[in-house]
């Protein structure tokens, strides 16, 4: 009989990386014979706020606080999310609803992860315990984290430390996405068996063949530079000008400034077909590497720098990460831009890490 797995992650709204890591995990687990149900935790919202946001989102020729673009992005991705997430709970916005779900579903295991599910600022709410699986009470149901991320390299929140430690010690298996996460588990919460694993987007890259099977290849030999910049726009402008001097491409695609509303497939396809990539996004960097692209990653301190450095150090590619402070050093910048990754070696390293990550996940579910 197939085992039933519950999956907890941040809400699937408009974050490409957040959606893709969830779809990738779902794809991997189903491929290995598990039934998967997304436990759909959403922040509580008032009816008035929902009506206001919905109204603003539908007014053309404006994008007040990015609400319209976010609404369209969410709307465009419903179909692909539903294509892969075939089982999900109703939207859950209270602990009572969550406890009801836990009692109603016969889960053999609940997995929390990946993405920044343990970043205090992202979950500092009345449902804080949910992301540490406090609602899982049945002894027959395993508690597992897979590639959970604290987002930053230190724990700053003493008021939540004892509660978090107590919840983590109830887990059967713990894995985190960054080496700094292993250190936090060990030094702050006395967890000495946390494992450093791959982000789910790297577990089974055949998922992207399936995802893009209905996307027609772009005709012609045009080459483009891809920009996926969430915050560091000034730095990216400087980098782009420097790339122009070293790399031949015909035009630039800027996902965040483009009027096109990218679906998940469009987003992945843009990375797959790019000539060179500039990004300050963790998952933007990951997809540049998945598709073996030349790229430069701009360290995004606001969104957590350790996420970048931990992954790149593991594959000996930390030289492709620059900070805003490095930009003034023109010779150093040119060296980073022109450095050609040895993808044969990098792919071998990721393959070995993938085997260990797969073994951890599947053995924890036995």
Image (spheres, rainbow, N blue to C red):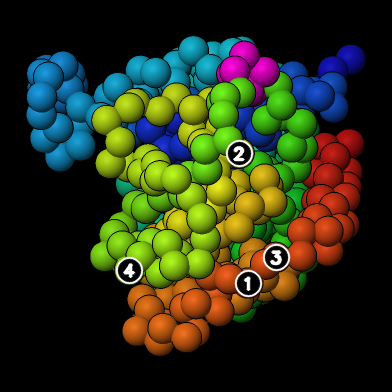
| Residue 339 located left or right of residue 300 | right
Residue 73: percent from left, percent from top: 35, 26
| Position of residue 26 in the picture relative to residue 306 (left or right) | right
Residue picked out by circle 2: 272
Task: Tell me which numbered mark, 2 or 1, is placed earlier along the sequence.
Answer: 2
The percent position of residue 167, horizontal first and vertical second, equals 58, 54
Closer to the camera in the image, 155 or 270: 270
The reply to whether the C-beta atoms of the residues labelled 3 and 1 are less than 8 Å apart is yes
Residue carrying label 1: 339
Q: Where is residue 158 in the image (x, y as percent from the top left)?
A: 40, 72
Q: Does the magenta stretch include residue 213?
A: yes
Task: Report the magenta residues as a range.
Answer: 211-216
**123 falls in the magenta region:** no
Rounded to the nearest angstrom, the CA distance separating label 2 from label 4 is 24 Å
- Spatial distance from mark 2 to mark 1, Cα to Cα? 20 Å
- Give the CA distance from mark 1 to mark 4: 18 Å
Q: Are marks 1 and 4 in contact (CB under 8 Å)?
A: no
Task: For the C terminus, give its image quadrant.
Answer: top right
How far, Cα to Cα, is label 4 from label 3?
22 Å
| Numbered badge on residue 341 | 3
């Amino acid at each position: 009989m197939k085992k039933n797995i519950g999956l907890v992650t941040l809400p699937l709204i408009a974050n490409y990386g957040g959606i893709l890591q969830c779809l990738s995990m779902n794809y991997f687990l189903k491929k290995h014979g598990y039934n998967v149900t997304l436990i759909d935790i959403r922040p509580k919202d008032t009816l008035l706020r929902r009506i206001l946001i919905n109204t603003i989102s539908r007014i053309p020729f404006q994008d007040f606080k990015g609400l319209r673009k976010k609404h369209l992005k969410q709307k465009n991705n419903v179909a692909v999310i539903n294509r892969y997430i075939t089982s999900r709970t109703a939207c859950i916005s209270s602990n009572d609803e969550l406890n009801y779900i836990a009692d109603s579903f016969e889960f053999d295991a609940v997995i929390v992860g990946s993405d920044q599910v343990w970043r205090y600022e992202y979950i500092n709410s009345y449902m804080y315990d949910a992301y540490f699986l406090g609602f899982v009470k049945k002894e027959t149901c395993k508690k597992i984290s897979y590639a959970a991320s604290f987002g930053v390299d230190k724990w700053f929140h003493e008021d939540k430390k004892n509660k978090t430690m107590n919840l983590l010690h109830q887990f059967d298996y713990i894995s985190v996405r960054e080496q700094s996460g292993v250190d936090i588990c060990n030094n702050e919460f006395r967890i000495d068996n946390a494992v450093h694993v791959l982000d789910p987007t790297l577990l089974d890259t055949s998922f992207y063949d399936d995802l893009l099977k209905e996307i027609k290849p772009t005709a012609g030999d045009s080459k483009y530079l891809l920009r996926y910049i969430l915050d560091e726009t000034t730095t990216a402008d400087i980098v782009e000008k420097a790339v122009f001097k070293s790399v031949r491409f015909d035009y630039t695609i800027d996902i965040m400034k483009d009027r096109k509303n990218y679906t998940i497939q469009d987003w992945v396809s843009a990375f797959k077909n790019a000539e060179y990539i500039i990004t300050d996004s963790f998952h933007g960097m990951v997809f540049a590497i998945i598709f073996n692209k030349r790229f430069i990653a701009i360290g995004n301190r606001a969104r957590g720098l350790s996420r970048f450095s931990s992954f790149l150090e593991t594959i000996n590619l930390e030289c492709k990460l620059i900070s805003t402070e490095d930009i003034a050093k023109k010779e150093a910048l040119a060296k980073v831009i022109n450095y050609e990754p040895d993808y044969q070696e990098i792919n071998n390293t990721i393959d070995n890490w993938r085997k260990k990550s797969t073994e951890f996940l599947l053995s924890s579910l036995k």
